[in-house]
Amino acid sequence: MKSPKKPATPKPATKKDVVSKSAFAGIEDFLVKNEKVVIAIILSLATIFAVLLFDVKISEGNDDALYIEGGHSYATDFNNYRFTANAPLYPFFLGGVIALFGLKLILLKAINIVFFVASIFFIFLAFRRRIPALVMYPVLLIMALNSYFLYYASQTYTESLFMLLQGVALWGIFSSFDVILKQELNVKQQWKQYLQIGILIFILTYCKNIAIGAIAAVVMFLLIERKYVAAALSVVGYAVIKFPFEAIRSMIWGSSGQYSNQLQILMQKDAYDATQGTENINGFISRFFGNFDIYMSKRLYQILGFYNPDAIIIKTGLGILALILIAFGIYQAYRNKNKAITYLVWFTGIQAGLTFLLLQVKWDQPRLVLIYVPFMLMIIFYGLYKALEKGGASGLVAFIAVVAIVVASNFMTTTKKSVKNFPILKRNLSGDKFYGYTPDWANYLKLSEWCADSLPPNSFVACRKAPMSFVYGKGMKFYPIYTVPALDTTTTLSNPDSALALLKREKVTHFIIANLRRNPKKVDGFIINTIHRMAYPIAQKYPQKVKFVKKMGDKEDAQLFEILYDK
């Protein structure tokens, strides 16, 4: 009879193993033990730079003014107004602030700074002790120092609020997963977890329509974890919140749903011209790859400070490089069974994928991908961390070097912008609210303000950027003209009789013609000529019906005209 084998003697840890473990572990221990100090420093930096880059002006993008106008309508006509341009949570919130304090632009912008700083804190709460501190803190520091995040921190766009809600949602969803994944299915004990998931995702979708992908992320994650019933119950948790809310909403504001108006625009080949028809499958595939190129090959690197912010050339190789790094992070997450990063892959991937698939390529705005950048960095940094972890001190140096390059790039860009912004901010806060605008915009907005101060109360002025005119016009309503009305396809101008009939039907009394630059940084003669193409045919055919009222500015001026329908 053979003698039983002796248990194998474990190999003693080599010097290399000890160094490898202590190199990363030492810093991890330090960061965990001093987490309150570390996060306080990051939050302080975020606050300081948000103040230094504070912008009291409305951006030329128009959507931020649109949210304010929507909020004002909620505040003044709650039962009869329904915001349908985008998801309504943010203008709904602004309506509450405006109802309490009035239309105070600086206050509305300052609240967004609070949202931005709070978003960093809640992302910290969501990921602390779930991913390496050496992965989490650099991402939070990059957010605090990033000029794009800081720009939107003082604009009335949805990005700062949405980042906050993402942080809260991830924090709550992870805590729900802690229960769902570690216990056998017991609906009586776990119903609160599914309801919590439903509430958090509902709030996300009410802030941004594209966040509907977050519920799919929960389902996919739980299916991979073989929690099939839990996946279904998470959908039920969302439905339990969504359907009663929609019933109440329809009783107050009517039957039109949150997604109906925007979905119609997304389905069009051209968002601003329904006559071109609806998009087909090939068109959406082209959108996906076109948007991938824009946001992953250009915007991502611009946001991180590695690519000229004014560049229009797209280098597809940069997008492929980012995708490879993300794929490597995904591989490491699954290999090391890190649940937080694994869910984050689905959470970010599905929402970003929907963004690339559905949104019009021509929109090309950094904010559309900005909200996913911290999570992309977490996935990339996690992959690098795990790959270099076994390299000991040299691996740690390499990891810190990569992180330091990204942090330094953001810090230098933000410092330069802060220095440039300070004199503008100083002038704005001292009362010169138009300082910092180029002359074309300053003249247009000054004339909008003049309309509010000087025209009769029943006046209704047509203009190209009505929400911006509304903000500087002290709450006066303006009639928006985003495309040439009654377009004659032969001349590409308005049909004068049809255009006049439309304006009369809408009770428009005046219109503003402004020389707004097509390229904000160049005076090259190319302007946004939508109103010109409407007004010129009317003035040519019926000169007696168009009366000059006011001019603002000598160069790149804006002019106001009255329409005399009875002449």
Image (cartoon, grey):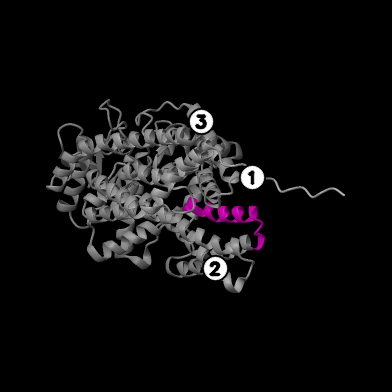
In this picture, is 541 found above or below 154?
above
In this picture, is 320 found above or below 502?
above
What's the amino acid at mark 2?
A: Val
What's the amino acid at mark 1?
A: Pro
Image coords of residue 194 (percent x, y):
55, 65
* One can see residue 493 in this view: no
Image coords of residue 154 (percent x, y):
28, 48
Q: Dot 1 surroundings within 10 Å: few (below 14), some, or many (20 or more)?
A: few
| Cβ atoms under marks 3 and 2 closer than 8 Å | no
Q: CA distance from mark 3 to mark 2?
A: 42 Å
Whether the magenta-drawn stretch holds residue 215 is answered as yes
Q: Dot 3 surroundings within 10 Å: few (below 14), some, or many (20 or more)?
A: few
Q: Dot 2 surroundings within 10 Å: few (below 14), some, or many (20 or more)?
A: some
Q: Position of 402 compared to 513: left or right?
A: right
N-terminal-most mark, 1 or 3: 1
Q: Secondary structure at mark 1?
A: loop
N-terminal-most mark, 1 or 2: 1
At 14% across and 33% down in the image, what residue appears? 554
* Viewer-proximal residue among 453 and 152: 152
In this picture, is 497 found above or below 297?
below
* Viewer-proximal residue among 2 and 127: 2
Whether the magenta-drawn stretch holds residue 465 is answered as no
Residue position for label 3: 321
The nearer-to-camera label among 1 and 2 is 1
In terms of image quadrants, where is residue 93? Answer: bottom left
Residue position for label 1: 10
| Cβ atoms under marks 1 and 2 closer than 8 Å | no
Residue position for label 2: 240
N-terminal-most mark, 3 or 2: 2
In terms of image quadrants, where is residue 405? Answer: top left
Find the magenta span and give its range. 209-229
The label number, if any, that marks residue 310 in the structure image: none
